[in-house]
Image (tube, helix red, strand yellow):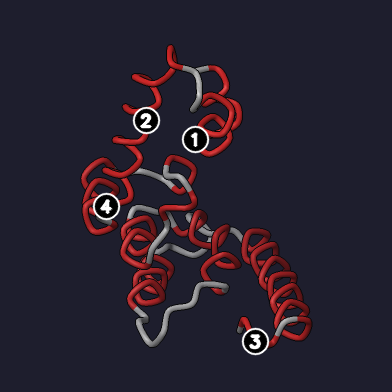
Amino acid sequence: MFCYALFGFDKTLKEFDSHASCKPVLDEFKKRKSELEADSDNLASLVTSNKLKVDEVASEKFSLSVWKALVENMTASEVLKVLSRLWCLNMDGDDSVWKAATEVLEAADAGKQVYPAEVFVSQCDYLKSLVKYAIKSFAHPEKY
């Protein structure tokens, strides 16, 4: 359990899969992992119903439906903080996440819910993510 908490599922499985005493615990971990991976729409509904935040969902679970649910639960300040991550998403024509982010930002009361410094930091983060993406796509154009 301690190894799982520190290093995650994959490393724990590699290290302890051959140990007979760990087999029941690892089988339960495998079962839970497959349940969580099975349906991203189910996770999106859990995010919506429980008002989960970005830090409360494992990043490998982020699909477009999960991102949309997360953005709908965010304040304008939180949306500004994750804009650089949203920009790097491959949406393939689905702009529902951007529409949700736009609705949150348009509903915000400027000066009370969004501060100019937050907008400036968000712009800087956006530019940094733009540069990182450009470098990646230039170095490995076949991936992008």
Name which quarter of the figure residue 35 lies in. Answer: top left
Amino acid identity at mark 4: Ala
Which of the two labelled residues, at mark 3 and mark 2, occupies the earlier sequence position? Answer: 2
Q: Is residue 40 left or right of residue 81?
A: left
The residue to which callout 1 is attached is 9
Amino acid identity at mark 3: Glu
Category of crowding for the residue at label 2, using alpha-carbon neighbours closer than 10 angstroms: few (below 14), some (14–19), many (at least 20)? some
Question: Alpha-carbon distance for marks 1 and 4?
Answer: 16 Å
User: Split into 4 quadrants, where in the image is the C terminus?
Assistant: bottom right
Q: Label 2's element?
A: helix
The residue to which callout 3 is attached is 142
**In the image, which disc is placed on residue 29?**
2
**In the image, which disc is placed on residue 95?**
none
Which of the two labelled residues, at mark 3 and mark 1, occupies the earlier sequence position? Answer: 1
Name which quarter of the figure residue 109 lies in. Answer: bottom left
Of 119 and 72, the residue lying toward us: 72
Q: Label 1's element?
A: helix
Category of crowding for the residue at label 3, using alpha-carbon neighbours closer than 10 angstroms: few (below 14), some (14–19), many (at least 20)? few
The residue to which callout 4 is attached is 38
Which of the two labelled residues, at mark 1 and mark 4, occupies the earlier sequence position? Answer: 1
